[in-house]
Image (cartoon, coloured by chain):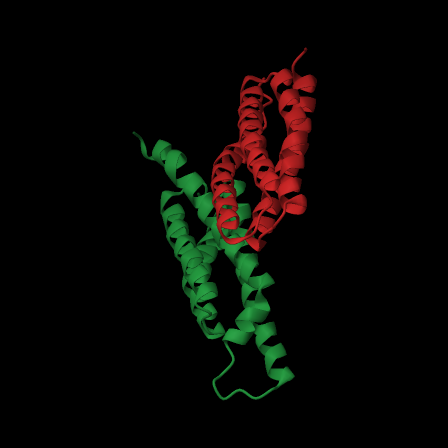
Amino acid sequence: MSMSVLCADALIPSRFLTLIAHLTITVVILSARDEVVTASLPYDYEEDDNYQSRKSFEILIGLSLAIGLLAIELTGFIFGLSMFMPAASVLSIGCHASAAIALSYALFDSWDSSLYWAVFALCSVPPGLVEMINAVNILVLKRV
Amino acid sequence: MTSSSLMFEVLMYLNSYYFGAFAVCELLMTVFKMINLPYPNRNIVLELMVIILLCCIEYARIFLGRKGNLTQKVGPIVMSLFLTVPSFLSVVYLLLWQTYVLRLEVILCYIELVMECLESVLGVVCIGSFYKYNDF
């Protein structure tokens, strides 16, 4: 079986599904933001609305950035920029699958919000960056 | 002259996999609700029926849409567009009128609805281009 057939058969659907899984769990956490804020309060916390709204805003920014990167990647993927690139697909599948698993753990075990940034840096940024470099290569520099 | 729509094929292909995952998630969530929440008997039967019917309709819709697009025939695509209506309504049922709606379900249903809308628009575009380039 040639490489491109293998890629079309297995990598494309699994990449799409892992992207959607990451998107879904991100939106779930976004809509359950209050629980995350409660979970990431310090032990010696005293009633302070300012602190809570700052935390809530921080989580909002992090998750919105993650959704933005996902949107860029989904667009590049569906319009075929990186659909037939096995290396980019494998990177993307690995990162997004681990992100989806890590984020569902985060929600169930009520992780601190600083850990979300670690997940963001490790699992959202690399495939998004690769996708953007890819898009610049193809659309601007006309290299394939 | 080929006038099949690549975007339509890509979306249908991805939707066939997405729907598989969607159906499995829906069934598992229904089982979860059955175990954990008090349910009137009639509702559970109704909801399971809706999910099973949705699977059948969606299978036929995607099959007909892809075949019609690849063979450049208008008939199957029109059938597929007709089948979009019950499919859309069943997803809306799962989204709004179910006994219990989970947060995860809301998001999954919205994604499915967005894909169906895009596919119906592209299906109409596809029929237009068949009429333009081929003499039926």
Q: Chain B colour?
A: red
Q: Is residue B125 left or right of residue A82?
A: right
Q: Is residue A15 left or right of residue B95?
A: left
Rendered location of residue B100, percent (x, y): 61, 50
Q: Is residue A85 left or right of residue B42?
A: left
Q: Is residue A142 visible?
A: no
Rendered location of residue A38, percent (x, y): 54, 75
> Which chain, by letter, is green?
A
Quadrant assignment for the N terminus of chain B: top right
List the single residue furthest toward the left: A1
At x 60% / y 22%, what residue is drawn? B3
Rendered location of residue A131, percent (x, y): 47, 52
List the single residue furthest toward the top: B136
Rendered location of residue B89, percent (x, y): 67, 36
At x 58% / y 26%, what residue is drawn? B61
Quadrant assignment for the C terminus of chain B: top right
